[in-house]
Amino acid sequence: MSSGAPQQQQAPPPYRPYKQMRAATPHSRAVSCVRFSPCGRLLATASLDSTVALLSPSSLAVIATLRGHTDGVSDLSWSTDSLYLCTASDDRTLRIWDVRPILSRLNPGAQPADPNADRCIRVLKGHTNFVFSANFNPQTNTTVASGGFDGTVRVWDVKSGRCVRTIDAHSEPVTSVHFIRDGSIIVSGSHDGTCKIWDATTGSCLKTVIDEKKPAVSFSMFSPNGKFILVATLDDSLKLCNFSTGKFLKVYSGHVNRTYCIQSAFSVMNGKYIVSGSEDNCVYIWDLQGKNILQKLEGHSDTVISVSCHPTENKIASGGLDNDRTVRLWVQES
């Protein structure tokens, strides 16, 4: 016989505010992207200075700098096992970096890794214009999707370095590509005002989620559970869409987003939040269900272009554009 009262639906935990814990300037130009590794042991940052930095997620000290791109880097993606990093650049290439030597040296008592060693193992060539977005298939570290200013979405075999599928996806630059968690489909967004779902194997278009000429779709991603798509448009709006029905369920607003492709994130550690940068130099946190702004984090001195939520700790990283150039770490008060 079971004991105790029937299980009640748990109320969300009370919101605990974030406060700034650290700030660092690992780059000489704008920070374009910040991404915690899935294992939580590294924070990767990309910059218009053409480098990628690997930082300590607690101190923000630079552990290694990845050099090789010849123009600004716009996006980063970790493989699910945290062993590889993919970067997308204005030099029209993607690069795959082997992070295993750096991770192995993070263990207590190990000698630090050479911070300037060449970690690049593949250069993926095929885009005919800037590569703006990259995403590892979550199910394998051998497949990457990319989106570029040439309007194409491309799927790459990392082992051979070959492009295995080119999709003429959009009539204007592709601003984002993102795999669903089982790796079967890809969502893409574009300046052409559309957001589309693609079969990752065949490259066929399964659904057009948004089909407007304006405003531009500046970012799109699947939710961690794969049921929803978060879409940003350049009219100060973030929308949550049920992609199986195509219905928009929530709209998050209050931030400023008219110009830049700002990368948002889901926070599912302690309550469910939507986190985004903004052109008023702040980080916004919304309640996912209630759509209300829970907090506005101030500290950057230029547009906050990218945010990332730590996989196991209540921690947010953010990166600012050229007049700021800082990476900031925000932690929930305990």
Image: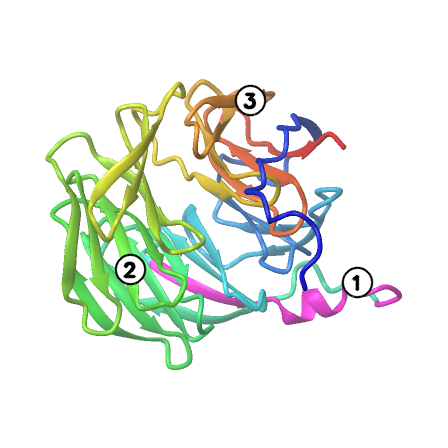
Nearer-N-terminus badge (1/3) = 1
- Per the rendered image, the range of residues in magenta is 93-110
Q: CA distance from mark 3 to mark 2?
A: 31 Å
Q: Quadrant of residue 186?
A: bottom left
Label 1 environment density (alpha carbons within 10 Å; few <14, some 14–19, many ≥20):
some
Say which mark, if any, is on residue 112. Answer: 1
Which of pointers 1 and 2 indicates the residue nearer the eye?
A: 2
Say which mark, if any, is on residue 45. Answer: none
Q: CA distance from mark 1 to mark 3?
A: 38 Å
The residue under label 2 is: 186
The kind of residue tagged 2 is: Ile
- The residue depicted at 60 percent of the width and 49 percent of the height is 6
Which is nearer the eye, 192 or 25? Answer: 192
The kind of residue tagged 1 is: Pro
Residue 22 in sight from this viewpoint: no
Which is nearer the eye, 222 or 122? Answer: 222
- The residue depicted at 32 percent of the width and 71 percent of the height is 156
Circle 3: element type: strand
Which of pointers 1 and 3 indicates the residue nearer the eye?
A: 3
Label 3 environment density (alpha carbons within 10 Å; few <14, some 14–19, many ≥20):
some
Circle 2: element type: strand
Nearer-N-terminus badge (3/2) = 2
Please tell me whether residue 149 is drawn above or below residue 326 in the rendered image.
below
The residue under label 3 is: 295
Q: Quadrant of residue 144?
A: bottom left
Q: Find residue 12 and report its horizontal and vertical position in percent.
A: 58, 36
Which is nearer the eye, 214 or 24? Answer: 214
